[in-house]
Every structure is written in structure tokens, then in C-alpha cells.
Amino acid sequence: ILSLLLRLANLLLATSGLAAAALSLFLIVCMLYLPENQHYSGPNRRGTDDHTFVRGNNPSKNLSLSSIVDHNGMVKINASLSTMNPLDVWESLIKTSEKKEKKQTVIEVGVHSPKQCIDAAERGYDTHCFEPSPPSYTRIERGIDKITSETRDRIHIYNKAVGATSGQTIPFHSTGGTGDHVGEYDMWRMKRRFESQSEQDLKKRGNIVQVPTICLDDFIAGDDIDGDGVFLLKVDTQGFEPSIFNGLENTVRDASIDFIIFEFWPRGMDLLADTYNECTGHKILDQLISAGYTLYALKVESHPKAPLRSQSLQAEAKTRPYTVEHTTEYCNWFFQLEEKYSDE
């Protein structure tokens, strides 16, 4: 599930990677989060009434919880963008650079292809791109070498894994494909380890390499970020998102990022966190809601080899719950759909 943050939903409506997952994966959904410059006028999940919420050291960001939790205490997910592709949203967002006077920063975590980083840099963004897979990193370097020196100077690439802490090393499953991920998990069969020794499975397994880690709280607070905070963050890491957001707590709490696009794949998140069927990914949604961000659901998407796709997938997507008592209810919808089609 790719997710994002948007200051004005109309921006996307007007201008308008998925996981190489296990064969049992049917869905990757997109969400959008939005800091709004409005006053709060209703109850919120923490029981605070009639307050203007200001986050971090940026008093210009007055955040509204009335768009997140209704008067009955139900969590609301906006469905107005639920047919949009997340990469189209990315493109629409970076086009707003033409209207920006201040220097803006874009961060992409889990790059695979340099296209999004290059597009952002060409529009004037200072762009930081993290890719732990050695073959993918090499491919990104080659792509960046082909662009103009002016654009290249705005792109900074890192052969590191973004996670909960900095200065560690973690095992990384590396083939150079879109499904590369942290750990030695078999994401095609949704198992903790590869068991098959067939030639095809060994090719899918690739190499397990040790890669250094960095957490975004440390990176964003450091000397590498110029300008006024981060305009756009995109995270696509095949289920490792909960660890990344654990290392992003301060930045999210301070609302220092305007827009966030991230993959929300509950089954993959539980696999990498060793929390089978616990929907650990809902904690990311809670974290963003608590910071005042509004959730927008984007288009439901699946891996090309998944049995549920095309018209059937979009028909099932219409059953997504957008008003829920708790974010686990939204998260569990994906598990329930997988169980419905488990024999396929």
C-alpha cells in the first residue's frame, strides 16, 4: 500500500511500485497524509477539544484533527483520491516546485529506478535517495551519470538501509529487482526463510549482503538537509516501513514533512516484524494521525502475478472501509481479502 501526504487534495484532482511480493500477496494500497492549515473544531482521539494544533518548531503549521476523527470518535480516511496511482501523485506534487521560492528537499527511500529522483532534481529539488541493494545502487549511479551536471549536483545517493537506528548493519536480500528487501525472508511464499533449493528459487533469493543503516530522524536533523524542512518523502521498502517510521518519530511529531508517500502492505510488514497476523502496520497510521496528518486512500494495486487483479481487484477495492473505529479495522481488511482468495 503506497501512502502519501498532501497539503491540498485538489492539487492532485486537478492535475490528474510496487512490491515484488509473495504469490499470496493480493494488495498493495496507497494512502495519503495531509497537514492542513485549519483550526480544530471537534473532538480528537486524545480527547482534546477546541484547540489549534501547532507542531514542532514551525508555528505556521496549524494542524486539524477534525478532518481525521469525526464527532463520534471514528477515524476517517478520505477516499476522494482512491483511484489515483501513487506515482502520478508524486509527479503532481513535484510539479508544484515551479511555485516554490524557498529551497525544497525530497527524500526517496527504496529507489530501484532513479527516475523519481531525477524528475525531482530537474524541477529544482534537493533530492536524497536511499537504496541498500548494491546492484540497484549501481544502476542508479549509471542513470544519474547521464543527466546534466546541474541536475546531478542536486541528487545525493546513499547505499544504505533506512531503519529505526543509525550506525548498525542489517542483512539485505539483494537481486537488483523490485522485490529486494531487508532480511532473509522468502516474500514469495511469505516465510521467514528460503527453504527451496530449486534453480528458480535460488535466483529469486539472490545474495544476502550486510548493509549499513541510518534513521531519518538523524539524517533530517543533520547537516545534509538545506532549506525549510522536507517537502516530500517516499518510502517503498517491501514491508520494512514500520522500522523506518520508528526512526522517524521526531520528524513526524514535528510535522516537518509536508507530504509522505509510503507502501502500506500489512502482510509484508507482519512478516518482516515477526508479528504474524497482528497488523503491526496500523501503528504507522496511528503515528501520523496523532501528529495531525489526514489520511487519503489511493488506488489498490497488486503484484502482476497475483491472482486478484484488474477488474476483480478494483471491484473488491470498493469494499474498503474508509470510516473505522480503529486503524486495525482498515489494516485487517487486506488480510480478510487475502483469505477470501487464499485457494488461488
Image: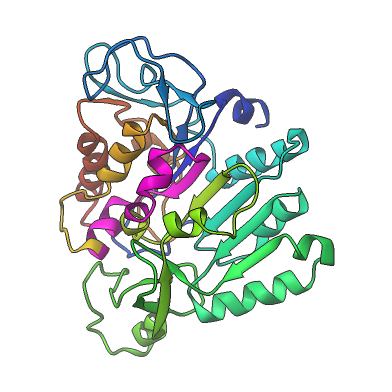
Q: How many labels does the image show?
A: 0
Taking 133 as reference, is 229 left or right? right
* Residue positioned 55% across, 29% down in the render: 7
Q: Is residue 43 above or below residue 270?
A: above
Taking 332 as reference, is 301 left or right? right
Magenta run includes residue 267: yes
Residue 251, how many percent across, how many down?
Answer: 43, 45
Q: In this view, does 153 lie above or below 185?
A: above
* Residue positioned 21% across, 73% down in the render: 192
* Residue positioned 51% across, 32% down in the render: 58
Q: Is residue 211 above or below residue 36?
A: below
Residue 171, how many percent across, how many down?
Answer: 34, 79
Taking 99 as reference, is 130 left or right? left
Magenta run includes residue 95: no
Residue range of the region highlighted in magenta in the rendering = 245-272
Residue 314, how many percent across, how many down?
Answer: 42, 38
Q: Is residue 113 above or below residue 13?
A: below
* Residue positioned 56% across, 75% down in the render: 136
Residue 39, how many percent across, how many down?
Answer: 44, 13
In front of the other: 238 or 61? 61
